[in-house]
Image (spheres, coloured by chain):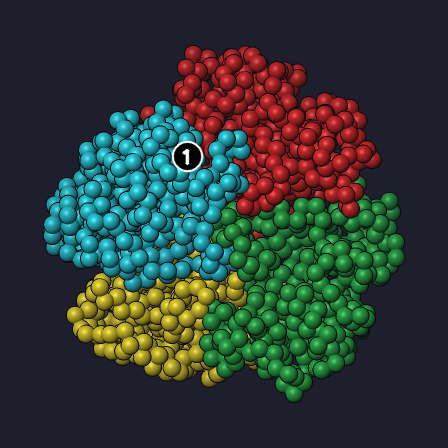
Chain colours: A yellow, B cyan, C red, D green
Amino acid sequence: MIRVGILGASGLAGGELIRLVLQHPDLELTFLGGSSSAGRRPAELHPGLRLDLGLTIETLPDSLADRCDVVFLATPAPVSAELAAELADQVPCVIDLSGAFRIRTPDLHDRWYPKVRRAEGLADRFVYGVPELIGDQLAGAALISLPGCFATAITIGLAPLVLSLGLNLRTVVVDGKTGSSGGGLELRTANLHPLRNGAIAPYSPAGHRHGAEVKDFLDRSKPGGVESLSMSAYGVSHVRGLMASSYVFTDDEVDARSLQRAYLRFYKEHPFVRVRRHNETLIPVPDPQAVLGSNYCDVTALHDEEGGRIVVLAALDNMVKGAAGQALQALNIRFGLPVETGLTMQPVMPA
Amino acid sequence: MIRVGILGASGLAGGELIRLVLQHPDLELTFLGGSSSAGRRPAELHPGLRLDLGLTIETLPDSLADRCDVVFLATPAPVSAELAAELADQVPCVIDLSGAFRIRTPDLHDRWYPKVRRAEGLADRFVYGVPELIGDQLAGAALISLPGCFATAITIGLAPLVLSLGLNLRTVVVDGKTGSSGGGLELRTANLHPLRNGAIAPYSPAGHRHGAEVKDFLDRSKPGGVESLSMSAYGVSHVRGLMASSYVFTDDEVDARSLQRAYLRFYKEHPFVRVRRHNETLIPVPDPQAVLGSNYCDVTALHDEEGGRIVVLAALDNMVKGAAGQALQALNIRFGLPVETGLTMQPVMPA
Amino acid sequence: MIRVGILGASGLAGGELIRLVLQHPDLELTFLGGSSSAGRRPAELHPGLRLDLGLTIETLPDSLADRCDVVFLATPAPVSAELAAELADQVPCVIDLSGAFRIRTPDLHDRWYPKVRRAEGLADRFVYGVPELIGDQLAGAALISLPGCFATAITIGLAPLVLSLGLNLRTVVVDGKTGSSGGGLELRTANLHPLRNGAIAPYSPAGHRHGAEVKDFLDRSKPGGVESLSMSAYGVSHVRGLMASSYVFTDDEVDARSLQRAYLRFYKEHPFVRVRRHNETLIPVPDPQAVLGSNYCDVTALHDEEGGRIVVLAALDNMVKGAAGQALQALNIRFGLPVETGLTMQPVMPA
Amino acid sequence: MIRVGILGASGLAGGELIRLVLQHPDLELTFLGGSSSAGRRPAELHPGLRLDLGLTIETLPDSLADRCDVVFLATPAPVSAELAAELADQVPCVIDLSGAFRIRTPDLHDRWYPKVRRAEGLADRFVYGVPELIGDQLAGAALISLPGCFATAITIGLAPLVLSLGLNLRTVVVDGKTGSSGGGLELRTANLHPLRNGAIAPYSPAGHRHGAEVKDFLDRSKPGGVESLSMSAYGVSHVRGLMASSYVFTDDEVDARSLQRAYLRFYKEHPFVRVRRHNETLIPVPDPQAVLGSNYCDVTALHDEEGGRIVVLAALDNMVKGAAGQALQALNIRFGLPVETGLTMQPVMPA
C-alpha cells in the first residue's frame, strides 16, 4: 500500500481527495493536515464522507517522511509554495494541486500570482502538465504540479490541433463556464446561495490565469503554435463541472473529418479522454453533467465553416479530472500503477 | 384603451405577454388565440396567471379588425409568416415576436429559416429592430418584427462600438448562455428536468441564427462595420435570463475610459439599457439575475488590453426585454405612449 | 404621497421593500437606514435595483418624524425591539417585519426569542396578524407587527377550518419547505451555494417558532380551536418561495366539497388569497413558483379520506406575501388605500 | 462472474443499473433488453456511460436462461408483472425494481396498482423488503421484489421504533420530498425544466402508494405496531435524492438518548445505514446531498418533546439505495457475496 498524506484536508479539493483515496485499492490514507481545522474528524467538515474513518486532522508534524510516501497539497497557492519548499526533500513525492508551480515563465507567474513567492529554482524541479500529454515525465517524479481545472480542459481541447495536426493557431478565444464548486467554500456574500443560484456571473470577464497557464505550456511544447490566446470565465448555476469552449482561428486548412480523426487518434490510448460527436446521445455533448463524478474529459472539435473557425468543446468534473482525480491519475503513473486504478467510477448522471 | 390580441397564447411568450398586458394601464386584452388550446382558460396553461381573467382561448375568427387595435404574434416562425400575410391589411398593427421577418436579406433568411416562406414583398414592409436603435421607425408602424432574445442583447452590446465609436470590428466571437425558458415548452427528452438541470448544453455550438440576424442588421446600419461575426449558444442550468458575451477584435484604437463614456452617452436617453461597471455591486454584473422579470438590458464593455480585444457583456430577461417586454416597449412607441408605460417593474432578485 | 422610511435597508427584506415601494404609486421613499452599510447607495447592495435612486443609506438621525409618515423595520428581531421602543411615539406608523412582536404570550415569546427584550407594555400596543384576518384592526394603527413568512401561509391555510367551519383541530402537523432566501444573507458555510444547492436541509426538524406564533394567534382568536400544533422546517434547492403543508386531524365531520366551499367563501373578498384546485393547471398547485414575485398566497384544502385527515397546502413568495408585499398590503389598509394598490404584479413564471 | 441481464435498459433505473454493474467486480453484463430502444447502444440513451460497452439493446429472446444468472426488471410495474411470470422459472434469479410485487395484501395492491395484474400465486413467491431487515430471506431467493425509493427510507426510519423499541405507533404522518429523477423521463409538460425547476410540486398530496407499501410490510412484520400511516409527496428543485420525514405519535414513553441508542444498535451491522446526529457536520443532516451517488441511507430520530412526537428523518439517493444500488445489495446477499461488494463508492458531494 502506498501511504498518502493530504494537506489542506478541510477544503473542497481536500475532501474530494479523501473520497477518491478511499476508493483506491492501493492507497492508504495516513495523514490529514489542516491548520484551523486541526483536531476535527474529516466527516465533520465533509458531510458525505464515511463516518468511521479513524483519522483526525492534524497540524503539520516535524516530519512526514515516516508516515507518507506521497503528499498532496490541496492548499491555497501561497501556502503550497511554502509547503513545497519544506517537503521537497523530505517525502518521496509531492503533488501540488494549487497554481503555485503551474506557470513556468517567471514574469508570467509573477503577473498572475503576485502573492505567490516560489523558492529559488524550485519551480523548475516540478513536472507540470496534463498526464495524457506528459505521461513519461511523471514516472518517478518527485515534484508534480497539476494543471488548473480550466487549463486541463483547454489543453486537452487544443493539444491535437497544435501537437498533432500542427496547425498554427492565430487567435484562440476561450470562454469558460463553471459551477460554484470551482470557487471553493470562501465566505463571500456573492457565493451565498441566494445570489449565486440562477446567476451567470462574469467573475473573470477579461483574462483568467488558466488561459495564461495554457499559453505558457503550449509555448514550451511547440513554440509559435499559438499566437494569441485570451480567456473569460463565468460562474453558472450548478455546483460541479465545467466547460471550456475554445474558438480557434487559423489560416491553415482543416476539415471536419480530419479533425475528428486527429482527435480520435491523439487520445486513442488515453481512457479518460472521450472524443465525442456532438449529437451522439440524448443531449448535446460535451456537457459536464455527462462526466459528473468521473475522471473523464469529454472533448469535441467542430469545424464551423461559415464562421471560419474551429470550435473546441471540452467538459470535465472540476473536482475530479480538474483536481483530485487527475491527482490520482498522476500518482498512478508516478508509482507505476495502471492509470485507471481507483478511477473507474462511471459518471453519476442524472444528478 | 388600446385593444390587444395575442396569437399563440398558450406558449411561454404568449403567457408572458398576457402577464405584462395585465400590468399595463392603457391596454385591454380582447383576444387570445390558439389552435390546440382553443376553449381553455389562460390560467389552465399559465399556472401563475390570475384566475379570473374572463377570457378563453379561441381559434382565429374571420376578422380581428373589430376586436383588436394591435395583434401580437407569439407563434412559431412558420405560423407567424402565414398569419402576418393574413392580418397585415386587417388590423392596424401586427407585432411579430418570431424569427419570420427578422433577417431581411433573402438568401440569409432562407439559409437560417428554410421552412419559413414569406409572402412576396411582405418582409420589406416590416420594421425590424431593437427599439432603442430604431425608435423613430416604430411610430405608427403597421408591421413590426422584434429581434430575437440573443440578437437584442448582442445588438445593444455592439451598437455603440459600430454606430457611435465608428470602430471597424474585424472579428466578433459571440458566446451566448441562456436558461431553459429560451427553448419554450417543447416536449423533448433533452428538455426534461433531470437532463437539463446542471447542464451546460452546447445546443448550437457552431453557428446560431441570432448571430446571422445581428450581422444582417449591422450590415444594413453601417456597411462594413462588422467584418466577421460567429456565434455559439449554450443552455445553462437556470430558467430565465441570458447573457451574450461578444469578444471583439478591432485594429482601431480604443481605451477603457472612452468605451465607458461612449456607452453611457449612447444609451443616455434609453431607460431600459443600463450601462454598468463590472464591480459596482455585490455580484459581478451584468448578470441576468439582476434584471429578472424586468425590461432592463444591462451592458458593460471592457477593454482587455492583454488579450487585445474588447469584451462586451449584455444580460437581459429573455422573456421580457428579449420578448414580451420589448414587444410592449415597441407598442408604446408605436402608439405614442411614454416608452416606460407598464414596464417599470423592478427586477425580482434574488429569485 | 406617503413618505416611507426603511430601516435595515441593506438586507434581503429591506431590498425587497425598496423594490415594491418604487412600484407603488402613492409612496415616496424618503429614508433608508442601515448601520454597517451607511454611506452606500442601495444599488451597491441590491444588484437589481434601478441605479439612479438618489438616496444613500444613512445611520438613524435624532428624529425621523419630519421625514417619514411610516417606517418599516426590516431589522433583526433584537434590533427591531429596540428601534420600536424608540420610534413608537415619534412617527405615525411603525411596521415591523421581524419576529420581535409576533408572539403575544410572554412565556412563549421568551422561549422562542430568548434574546429579544421588549419594552414593558410595548408588545400589547402592536396590532399583529395576517391582513386578511385582522383587516379592521389595521386601519389607523400606530404599531403593526407582521407575521412570519411560514406563519402567514399556515394561518391562511388553517383559518377557514377554525374560524369558519368551526372544527376542533386535535393534531396539526406542519411541514414547511422554503428556498434559500428565507435565511437571508448570513455568511455561514452551510449557506454557500455548493452546500446549499441540491439540499434538503432539515434546519428546524423538531419545532419552529413560526409554528408557535400561529398557535399563539389561533389560541387568541378561538380558544381551544387547535389542541396541538407541531412544526418542522426544511430548506430546499431554490431561492424564493415557500410551501406550508398542514396535516390536520380532527374528530369533526368534514367532506371535500364543504371544504372547498368554505375556503372560497372565506377568502371571497380577499384578492391576494387564491383558493385553487390541485389539478386545475399544468402543474400541481399550490406551488410557490406560481406566485413568484407576486403578493398571492395560493391555498388548497384536500380531504384525505383514507388517511383520516385534512391536507392544507399554502404557497407564497416569502419575500413578498411573506414579507415586503404583505407589509405594503398592511400599509394600504392602514392608510385607507385600496388594498391592491402597488401590489398588482402578476407572478413571474417560469423563473 | 455472475452474468447479469437488465430489462428496461433505456430508462433511468436501467441506466443506473448499468453504471453500477460496470463498477462491480463480480458481475458481467450480458444482456440489455428494451422494446422501443432495441438496436441502440446504451451510450446513446445514457449520455454519461462509457462509450465502448460492446452491448446493444435487444428485444427479449425466447430464453435468457443461457445468457443470464440473474435478471433485473427495471420496467414499469405492468410490464414487470408480465415479465416476471415469463421469467420466473427460466432464470435462477429475477429481481424486480418496480411496484408490481411490493404490496402483498391483494386488496391493497389492487387499490394502488389497479392496472397491474399479477399471475395467480406469483406475488407470494417473491421475497420483498429492505435488505437490512430481511437479509436471511434473500440468500438463494429466486424472486426478489425491491421496495420503492420512499418506502426504503420510511422503513429504515421506522423499523427500530417498531421492531426494536417495540413502540406502538398511533399516528405516523409521512412527508416525502424528492428530486425530479424520481419521476423518470416521462414526456409530460410538468416535467420540463422551466416548469420543474424552482418548484415545490405537491404531486401526491393526499396519499402515496409507498406509504401503503410500508404499512403493509410493517403490519406483516409486527401486527398492530402501526395504527395509522398517511403520506404526502412533493417534488422539489433538484434531480437526485430524497428525504422521508416521518412524524410519529405514540403513547409509549421514549427519550432522546434511548432513541439514538436503539438506532445505533439496530443498524450496527449494516454498513449502508448511517445513524447520524442532526448537528454533527457542516450542514444539518440527514440531507440527500450527503449520500449522492452512494448506497448509504442516512437516518436520525429526534425526540420533539414539546411537539409530543418523534421526528424520524431518512435520506437516500433514490437511484442508488432507492433503486439500483439496493438491487445490487440484494444480489450480493442472494449470491453469497460480501454485501458491500461493488457498492463502496463514497458520496459525490458537493454536486
Q: Is residue D319 toward the left or the right of residue B5 in the image? A: right
Front residue of D339/D80: it is D80
Q: Is residue C260 above or below residue B8?
A: above
Residue shown at 69%/48% (left/top)?
D232
Q: Quadrant of residue A312?
A: bottom left
- The amino acid on which the numbered mark 1 sits, given as a three-letter code, is Phe
Task: State the image coordinates of residue D167 (x, y, percent, origin top left).
Answer: 86, 52
Residue at 83% in and 35% down:
C251
Eyeballing the image, is B178 above or below B134?
below
In-front residue for pair C329/C82: C329
Quadrant of the drawing holding the N terminus of chain C: top left
* Residue placed furthest toward the bottom: D66
Q: Is residue C117 visible?
A: no
Q: Does D253 sit left or right of B260 as displayed?
A: right
The residue closer to the viewer here, D73 or C79, is D73
Residue that label 1 marks? B31
Left or right for A289, reference A264: right
- Rendered residue at 23%/71% (across/down): A219
Query: Where residue B2 sits in the image (x, y, percent)?
Result: 34, 27
Percent of width and height locating residue A252:
18, 73
- Mark yes or no: residue D104 visible: yes
